[in-house]
Image: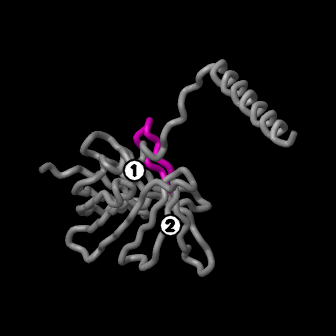
Amino acid sequence: MHKIAIWASALALVSLGGGVAAAQQAAPASAPAPDRQAEFKAFIADAAGTWDADITFPSQEKGKPDDKAKGVMKRTVKSAGMWLLDEFSVDGTPYQGTAILGYDSVTGGMAGVWTDNNQQQMRFDKGRWDAEKKKLTWHADVPGPTPGTYQRLLFTEEVKGPDVHEFRSVALLRTGEVPLVHIVFTRRKG
């Protein structure tokens, strides 16, 4: 009798499963959800290479001209296309910055770290890639000027063309956004 009950339960589950499958087939098809990881991996693959940087540091003083500089960003795909290693330098200075960024399967967004010889600390970044707009947007909370305080930095990298990316960084203060840097990256040929 016990075996009959098990078989009957199994048959009921199979029947229910068939009913669920039939209901799923009858439901109208919706657009498949975008594969965020595949989209970000495509961005990473496209970003690889050596990029010349035209850098502008917006003046924070009225009437004072912006500071300009040139630099180089080397971007290397790592870990079977999952992560991008950025190595950045500014010509004629000792400045060096290093980042690693990629898709975080836990958050479903971009995750990264940045460090450079100015700040001498690790900055932890979180953000997202918008494949439709071809724009990476992220933020980080960094120590503020007063011990124990933090300020939020916002960053964007927008693909302007196959060989041009535009980067912007701003600090969010109580008085509003303060532009920190604007960089136009142009991919080197060959």
Question: Quick one: label 1, few (<14), some, or many (20+) residues within 10 Å?
Answer: many
Q: How is the image coloured?
A: one colour
Q: Is residue 96 left or right of residue 113?
A: left
The residue that appears at 47% across and 58% down in the rendered structure is 170
Looking at this view, name the residue that lies furthest to the front. 1
The residue that appears at 25% across and 63% down in the rendered structure is 69
Give percent across and percent down for residue 51. Answer: 23, 55
Give percent across and percent down for residue 129. Answer: 46, 46
Instruction: Examine the image and state in which quarter residue 91 appears.
Output: bottom left
Task: Check residue 151 for magenta coloring.
Answer: no
Instruction: Examine the image and state in which quarter residue 8 appears.
Output: top right
Residue 65 appearing in the image: no
In terms of depth relative to the viewer, which is nearer, 61 or 176?
176
The residue that appears at 32% across and 41% down in the rendered structure is 160
Give percent across and percent down for residue 33. Answer: 54, 35
Name which of mark 2 and mark 1 comes first in the sequence: 2
Secondary structure beneath label 2: strand
* Up/down of 97 relative to 182, above or below: below
The residue that appears at 59% across and 71% down in the rendered structure is 150
Give percent across and percent down for residue 179. Answer: 45, 57
Q: Give the residue at mark 1.
A: 157
In terms of depth relative to the viewer, which is nearer, 96 or 41?
41
Tell me the chief SS of the magenta region.
strand
Q: Give the residue at mark 2.
A: 124
Looking at this view, name the residue that lies furthest to the right. 1
Q: Give the residues drawn in magenta, as a range.
A: 128-138
